[in-house]
Amino acid sequence: MIRPEWMAVALLAVSWVTALMVAIDALIDVRAWLARLRQWRTHLVTGTARSTLGSLAVEQRARTFDDGGIGFFERGHVSTVAPGDVDVAGEVLSVVPAPEVEVWLPHGDLLARAACGSPAEFSRLLVEAKGKGCLRTVTVEVSGGSRVWIAGVREGQKLVASLVSTTEPRAEARWRLALNAGLVLLDLAWVGAGTALALWPPAFGAISIIGASVLLGHLLGITPLAIKVRELSKTPARRELLGEWRPLAAPPTVAASGQ
Amino acid sequence: MVALRHKHDWRQVLVVVVYLALVLSMYFEPACRNVVCLALACTFSFYAMTVNHNVMHLSLFNDTAANRLFRLVLSFCALFPVSSLIPSHNLVHHHFNDDGELDWADPKHARFSWNLLNLLHFPNIIGPITFSHISRWARVTGRADYRAASTQESIFAFGLTGVLLYFDFWGALFYVVVPQLWGARWFLRVNIIQHDGCDLGSQWNHSRNFAGRLLNWFSVNAGYHTIHHNRPSLHWSELPEAHAREATGKMHPALMEKSLLWYLARTYLFRFSRPRPMDVGVSERAAPLGPVPGEPEPSGESLVPPAVTT
């Protein structure tokens, strides 16, 4: 017969292994963002775009909801950088894209572009989205006159850009680092608190049951949270847009909601 | 009169009955709380999940109420609403993508350098991804009958487990919840085991197969995965013959493993790093093989099993 203590120890081990795997998985993003921050110490410039420098396009499939709304599902994100000039600290640099270039824009800009403009637009898409749905592309440009941050390798007056951003990339990185650090702290605190309660004397008493419930809650609850953080930790060029349009009488404009 | 739709399906019923007998014996009879019963319960929990998978493709009974009841039982076996397999498995996984985006259970979601962690952590990653997508899918395209079935299954699974926890918390936690989670999580791991390193874009080289007789007897031929993907409506009892007839010779020999345990040991224990993807589909891409004879291309709604629509 298996002694309850052995089973309890085994389940504590499972809880801690899960907690550690969640933490290590988050640290993969932490390491990647720290590497970017280190690279940007020497390879990031800011200036003003003289012309349209590129765009971020999110292709989505629109499908109708059962309740008469329209839902949007991601199909892909495409960053495009067009060669152009940027004024940087009194000199003009010619930007050319590196092979794996990303364009970062404030998420709010994409949400605004994805929002429903009018009742007529809603009605038109509602018809097109029925059945298997229809495709749409939400595109936001890095327009001339925008303040831009560009990461890349400088070759004389040429700047081979791996990143063109209209949002401060270091702030984006720090926010994601904080998010992941928060997840790791919550993860370890949650499993630690559950362990302390589970081991509370008398063994297998009422408080111990609460502790085991906290650990079961951790096992089932921390992973959806971790996946949400993983999603939010993607670069702005890859972040999910999704969104929904809801039929409203007035006013007609309904903002898309990011998730 | 309620009857099985296929003569071989008694084996699927047997697997579920054995699993439930083991779990309930351990819960009600302390003498059964031993390593052998627990190990068997965990093993049969996984086998019950393969039954779960099969009945979402082809319903078991000729009677709607019996199928619904069996799905409730299976939901308790796995501690999640089994109808969720329709969007996640039938409609998305069988296409290997979600309309341009990654399959919710794509092995690429795992990203550790140490491959053992990929195996261990995989359910923690794709479980939440899958359920997040399912909830959105249910709101958009899920019919009311799907939502009703899923709700009933959740209430039954969590309700019955909750009752068992209420009357004997530790007994239920150790001997009911542990086997439930074990089976469900290994079922999710099957996605990385059977597809990691394969060519998901190819016709015959997208899946890894396992030929072990014992495994396939109890898992109702879950080892024959290539032919199952290409012909999802084929009854599980016909898979070995169809595999030999259609898949052997077309798929890369490396994708037929003799032993699951040896593959797991070789891939996740005896090496640190993740094996590089094999270009198993290279010859296939050079000379496309054309459609699978006698089977339409898997396409969305046609895969929804009759059991759910009735």
Image (spheres, coloured by chain):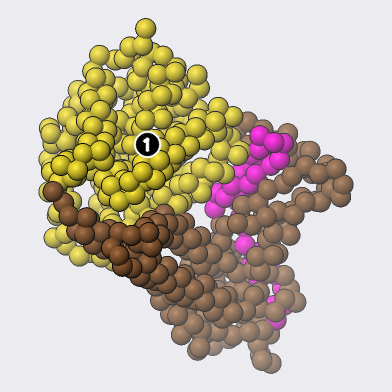
Identified at 73% across, 60% down, the residue is: A112
The N terminus of chain B sits in image quarter = top left
Identified at 13% across, 48% down, the residue is: A1
Query: Residue flagged by tag 1: what amino acid is it?
Result: Phe
Q: Residues within 10 Å of mark 1 (few under 14, many from 20)?
A: many
- Residue A188 in the image: state x and y as whole percent: 39, 71
Q: Residue pushed farthest bottom? A: A90
Identified at 66% across, 81% down, the residue is: A86
Given residues A194 and B196, the one toward you in this image is A194
Does the rendering let one see residue A234?
no
- Residue A205 in the image: state x and y as whole percent: 33, 60
Report the span colored magenta: A48-76
**Tally of marks:** 1
Q: Tell me the residue that label 1 is attached to.
A: B76
Q: Is residue A138 left or right of residue A194?
A: right
Chain of the residue under label 1: B
Identified at 58% across, 30% down, the residue is: B143
Overall secondary structure of the magenta stretch?
strand
- Residue B74 in the image: state x and y as whole percent: 36, 32
Q: Is residue B6 left or right of residue A236?
A: left
Q: Residue pushed farthest top? A: B1
Q: Which chain wears yellow?
A: B
Q: Residue pushed farthest right? A: A250
Given residues B95 and A251, the one toward you in this image is A251
Asked if the magenta segment contains residue A174, the reply would be no
Does the rendering let one see residue B36?
yes
Q: What secondary structure is found at the residue carrying circle 1?
A: helix
What colour do you see for chain A?
Answer: brown
Given residues B28 and A97, the one toward you in this image is B28
